[in-house]
């Protein structure tokens, strides 16, 4: 009687304890599983945030590039292509052709883009600076224009043609005139540069009239033709591509990127040149300057 009841009570109690222990074990395991899951999820989120933070904290390098008035829009045309290379462009415009070099030498610019190497060599010599010409990128050109005649061959005898007054541009025009068959030159008499005195043969008796830039622009309506620069034609709201002859080689006067000597191998140099040579940049330059420039790739 009594012993049997006690046995049944003990058996019931043991089973109940086992069930409770089993429930606790399952609960503990579930809690642990949840904890581990949350930890893993938390780690994953934390890692992603770190990645995002790292990405967002990447500094965009701003390049300060100086330019003279006639090429400001050339440099601005690079902006989109340069952004794709990871750089922001800040164009600093100057009113003259010396200050961009002064500012670069003093360290307020990363580089400038407006000059050819002969000009830079002269500036370095006169100012004791050591600025470096990196690579030719583009350039203006000298050409022969006429509003009366559609070819060099059709220019009449005794034609009057305007030509530059200054020595370097006059030299370029005379070389072009010889290449175009207008006349023949002798030996250059001005430190390797041709002058009007160096014309030896002039079969059509062409009369060359020295004029300043303004005179060359307006002279087209009165003279048989004028030597001029494409950029000057553009600024005078004339078609720079309407020439009847163009110089064969203007690489000596190609405009290029200039930096301080210690920056000639800087990390941004290659992406900068790449950005300039994109079709997007060239198309924007051509759209604005109407074909005033040629490119050196």
Image (cartoon, helix red, strand yellow):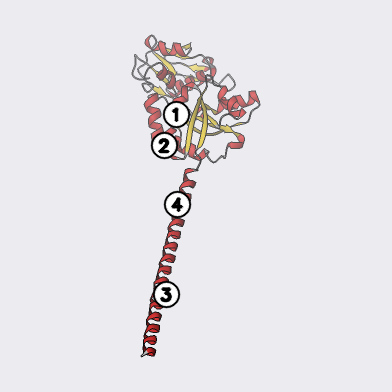
C-alpha span from label 2 to label 4: 35 Å
Identify residue for label 2: 278
**Residue 94: percent from the left, percent from the top?**
52, 22
Question: Of callouts 3 and 4, which one flags the residue occurring earlier in the amino acid sequence?
Answer: 3
Instruction: Point out residue 238 in the picture as x, y percentages from the top left corner.
Output: 37, 17
Q: Earlier in the sequence, mark 2 or mark 4?
A: 4
How far apart are labels 2 and 1 at the CA level?
Answer: 13 Å
Task: Using the numbered discs, state the Cα–Cα distance from disc 4 to disc 1 in whole angstroms.
Answer: 37 Å
Please provide percent x and percent y for residue 294: 43, 29
Q: CA distance from mark 3 to mark 4?
A: 40 Å
Q: Is residue 274 left or right of residue 127?
A: left
- Mark 3 or mark 2, whichever is nearer to me: 3
Foreground residue, 11 or 130?
11
User: At x 45% / y 47%, what residue is drawn?
Assistant: 52
Q: Is residue 205 visible?
A: no
- Which mark is on residue 48? 4
Q: Tag 1 or tag 2, which sits nearer the N-term?
A: 1
| Disc 2 packing (10 Å; few <14; some 14–19; many ≥20) | few
Picture coordinates of residue 264, whole percent (x, y): 57, 37
* Quadrant location of the N terminus in the rendered image: bottom left
Distance between the alpha carbons at the discs numbered 3 and 2:
74 Å
Q: Residue at x 64, y 28 (%)?
A: 129
> Of 14 and 245, which appears nearest the observer?
14
Name the residue nearer the viewer: 168 or 105: 105
Instruction: Kindly identify which residue carries mark 3.
Output: 21
């Amino acid at each position: 009687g009594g012993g049997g009841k006690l046995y049944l009570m003990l058996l019931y109690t043991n089973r109940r304890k086992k069930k409770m222990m089993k429930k606790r074990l399952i609960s503990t395991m579930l809690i642990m599983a949840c904890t581990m899951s949350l930890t893993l999820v938390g780690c994953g989120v934390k890692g992603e945030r770190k990645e995002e933070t790292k990405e967002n904290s990447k500094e965009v390098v701003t390049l300060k590039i100086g330019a003279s008035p006639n090429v400001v829009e050339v440099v601005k045309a690079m902006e989109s292509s340069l952004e794709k290379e990871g750089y922001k462009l800040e164009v600093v415009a100057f009113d003259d052709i010396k200050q961009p070099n002064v500012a670069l030498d003093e360290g307020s610019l990363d580089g400038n883009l407006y000059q050819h190497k002969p000009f830079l060599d002269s500036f370095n010599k006169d100012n004791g600076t050591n600025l470096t010409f990196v690579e030719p990128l583009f350039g203006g050109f000298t050409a022969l224009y006429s509003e009366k005649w559609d070819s060099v061959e059709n220019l009449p005898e005794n034609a009057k043609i305007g030509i530059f007054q200054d020595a370097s541009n006059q030299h370029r025009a005379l070389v072009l005139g010889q290449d175009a068959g207008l006349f023949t030159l002798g030996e250059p008499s001005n430190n390797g540069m041709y002058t009007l005195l160096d014309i030896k043969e002039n079969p059509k008796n062409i009369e060359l009239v020295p004029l300043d830039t303004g005179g060359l622009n307006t002279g087209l309506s009165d003279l048989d033709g004028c030597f001029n620069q494409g950029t000057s034609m553009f600024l005078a709201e004339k078609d720079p591509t309407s020439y009847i002859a163009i110089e064969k080689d203007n690489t000596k006067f190609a405009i290029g990127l200039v930096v301080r000597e210690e920056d000639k191998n800087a990390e941004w140099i290659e992406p900068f040149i790449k950005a300039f040579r994109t079709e997007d940049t060239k198309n924007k330059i051509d759209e604005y300057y109407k074909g005033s420039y040629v490119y050196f790739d």
